[in-house]
Amino acid sequence: MITYTKGQKFIIQQVIQEIKCIEKHFSNEVKIWTNQKRIIRLLIIAEAPLSCDRYFYNRIRGNFLQSLKTYYAVPQNSILDKLRVEGIFVVDMYELPIPTKYYDLDSKTHNLFDANYFGKKIRILGNAGLLTNETHAVFRYKKLIDRYLNMEKKEINTKCLKQFTYLLDSKQNPCSLNSVERPVQILSIHVKTYLNK
């Protein structure tokens, strides 16, 4: 049996609270889409928020999805409404709200990827009627594509990720949202072409 110190228990409780808070905001967003009778045209597969406070669906201010804000010429406080109208939804691939460096360190073993967690998120979207045969997916970051392809190569259970038609790059691989991430986000030409249809 594992025993934890008081400090470790506190950290575990904090992480559990963060996860519950993120789940609540995700559920609220699904309800908004359902009530507005929207469908997802473009599904952005993201990593995981750093915390509930920094969760995309829980913030009005912040530097999130800069390339889409630029593309649609909207301020941060209008981006959620604009994405709903355009049928763009963000879903997280991982459950734990921890810094990205831990997912980077895990990219050889993929212990932090939980197919049940991601599959449940997709089932929630499907059961709400938000996904159709026309839904396409992109990965938020290029490194998520690398992880995904690496998981496929290692025959890790990625069935939950194979339920989509991906936007493909010129090499016929799934593409990321942006062609450039830093210093400025530039929306991928493949995403622009799809959004302009």
Image (cartoon, rainbow, N blue to C red):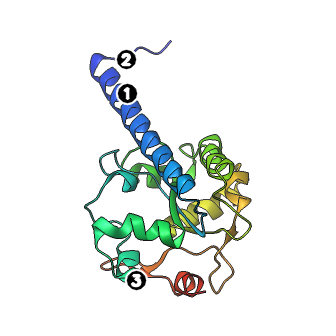
Query: Can the viewer see residue 140?
Result: no
Residue placed under numbered mark 1 in the picture? 12
Label 3 with label 2: CB-CB less than 8 Å: no
Residue placed under numbered mark 2 in the picture? 4
Q: Nearer the viewer, residue 133 or 177?
A: 133
Q: Amino acid at mark 1?
A: Ile
Identified at 70% across, 55% down, the residue is 154
Asked whether, in this view, residue 110 is left or right of residue 74, the answer is right
Q: Nearer the viewer, residue 161 or 77?
A: 77
Q: Tag count in the figure?
A: 3
Residue 83: percent from the left, percent from the top? 46, 69
- Does 34 sit above or below residue 23? below
Query: Label 1 to label 2, Cα distance in Å?
Result: 10 Å
Asked whether, in this view, residue 108 is left or right of residue 102, the answer is right
Mark 3 lies on a secondary structure that is helix
Going from N to C along the chain, the mark reached first, 1 or 3, is 1
Give the position of the C terminus as an image quadrant: bottom right
Identified at 62% across, 82% down, the residue is 169
Query: Label 1 to label 3, Cα distance in Å?
Result: 39 Å
Going from N to C along the chain, the mark reached first, 1 or 2, is 2
Mark 3 vs mark 2, foreground winner is: 3
Q: Amino acid at mark 3?
A: Tyr
Mark 1 vs mark 2, foreground winner is: 1
Residue placed under numbered mark 3 in the picture? 71
Q: Amino acid at mark 2?
A: Tyr
Residue 51: percent from the left, percent from the top? 34, 45
Label 1 with label 2: CB-CB less than 8 Å: yes
Mark 1 lies on a secondary structure that is helix
Counting other residues with Cα less than 10 Å from the Cα at mark 1, is it few (<14), some (14-19), or many (20 or more)? few
